[in-house]
């Protein structure tokens, strides 16, 4: 008797998108659960930005060496220090997947049917949660130091969104570095090498107008520049955006999409 062949399953874009986000949230939830086991890590990570605000910020504020317009230097640098904190947390996030490879966890991920980009994006969003917790420390401290912080709920929600988005950029960039170097020792060296140029080639602690022309050109390609610009617009009352808030978001989304795609393509090669 002739058997009836199964009809091929038709591609359903709605189902595919739903499956992608479900797997992304599964990875995200798994990563966020790790925070319950290391609450002290969040506090210790807050120490560096606190030192920047309390010591570095106070010294430069008294010297009046950097022109910041109508804002005090503490106000000017607060968004930059929040962006710096997100950068430093996210850029070393790739270290975790080196441990996961050594423990055999990545082999299990790759054996699952989950899209590779979902695995990468889930980890990037988890890096965003770790970074966003810093806003709960930095913003109140800046207010105590005299900064006129915009406490409008929509502005605060925008701050958390930008921190999450920027962390996805630097978190997935970190994953790409980890996939490339493959060892913890090399990763630490490359990660430390990358953080300082990204930080100082941005508008985090001084305005773009103070930079030499060649550095201003480089800063336009630095995603941290757009992250700081968006945070400064949202955190400070009456602060105009250099590029436009919409442009800042589009640039960060574009970098996120490109890096998630690239890391998703490279992810399976990590175990070879």
Image (tube, rainbow, N blue to C red):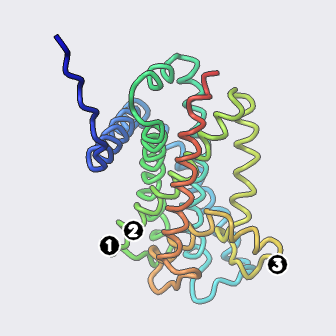
In front: mark 1 or mark 3? 3
In the rendered image, which residue does mark 2 sit on? Answer: 158
Determine which residue is flagged by label 3: 213
Residue plotted at (47% across, 59% down): 163
Please provide percent x and percent y for residue 232.
52, 74
> Going by the picture, which residue comes out furthest to the bottom?
70
Badge 2 element: helix
Nearer to me, 219 or 263: 263
At 47% from the left edge and 41% from the top edge, which residue is drawn?
A: 117
Front residue of 138/182: it is: 182
Q: CA distance from mark 1 to mark 3?
A: 35 Å
Q: Is residue 229 above or below residue 132?
A: below
The residue at 24%/23% (across/down) is 5
Q: Residue at x 58, y 18 (%)?
A: 102
Q: Answer yes or no: is residue 23 visible.
A: yes
Q: On the rendered structure, is 64 left or right of 6? A: right
How packed mark 2 is, by other alpha carbons closer than 10 Å (few <14, some 14-19, many 20 or more), is some
Question: Earlier along the polypeptide chain: callout 2 or callout 3?
Answer: 2
Q: What crowding class fits label 1: few (fewer than 14 Cα within 10 Å), some (14-19), or many (20 or more)?
A: few
Query: Marks 2 and 1, how far apart in space?
Result: 6 Å
Q: Percent from the top left, x then y, of residue 200?
A: 73, 63
Q: Which mark is residue 154?
A: 1
Q: Quadrant of residue 95?
A: top right
Placement of the N terminus among the 4 image quadrants: top left
- Among all residues in the image, which is located at the extreme top? 1
Residue 130, x across and y down, in percent: 45, 46
Mark 2–mark 3 distance (CA, rounded to whole Å):
31 Å
Give the SS element for disc 3: helix
User: Looking at the image, is mark 1 or mark 3 earlier in the sequence?
Assistant: 1
């Amino acid at each position: 008797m002739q058997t009836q062949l199964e009809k091929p399953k038709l591609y359903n874009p709605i189902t595919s998108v739903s499956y992608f986000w479900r797997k992304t949230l599964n990875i995200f939830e798994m990563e966020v659960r790790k925070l319950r086991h290391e609450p002290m890590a969040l506090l210790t990570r807050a120490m560096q930005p606190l030192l920047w605000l309390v010591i570095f910020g106070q010294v430069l504020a008294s010297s009046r060496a950097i022109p910041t317009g109508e804002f005090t230097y503490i106000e000017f640098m607060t968004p930059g220090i929040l962006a710096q904190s997100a950068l430093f947390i996210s850029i070393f996030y790739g270290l975790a997947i080196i441990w996961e490879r050594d423990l055999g966890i990545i082999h299990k991920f790759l054996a699952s049917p989950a899209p590779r980009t979902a695995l990468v994006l889930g980890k990037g969003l988890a890096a965003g949660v770790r970074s966003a917790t810093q806003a709960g420390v930095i913003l109140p401290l800046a207010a105590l130091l005299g900064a006129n912080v915009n406490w409008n709920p929509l502005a605060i929600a925008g701050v958390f969104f930008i921190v999450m988005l920027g962390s996805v950029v630097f978190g997935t960039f970190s994953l790409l570095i980890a996939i490339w170097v493959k060892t913890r020792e090399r990763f630490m060296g490359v990660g430390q090498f990358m953080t300082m140029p990204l930080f100082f080639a941005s508008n985090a602690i001084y305005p773009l107008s103070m930079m030499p022309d060649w550095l201003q050109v480089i800063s336009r390609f630095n995603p941290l520049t757009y992250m700081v610009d968006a945070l400064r617009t949202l955190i400070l009352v009456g602060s105009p955006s250099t590029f436009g808030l919409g442009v800042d978001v589009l640039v960060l989304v574009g970098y996120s999409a490109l890096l998630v795609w690239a890391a998703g393509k490279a992810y399976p090669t990590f175990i070879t």
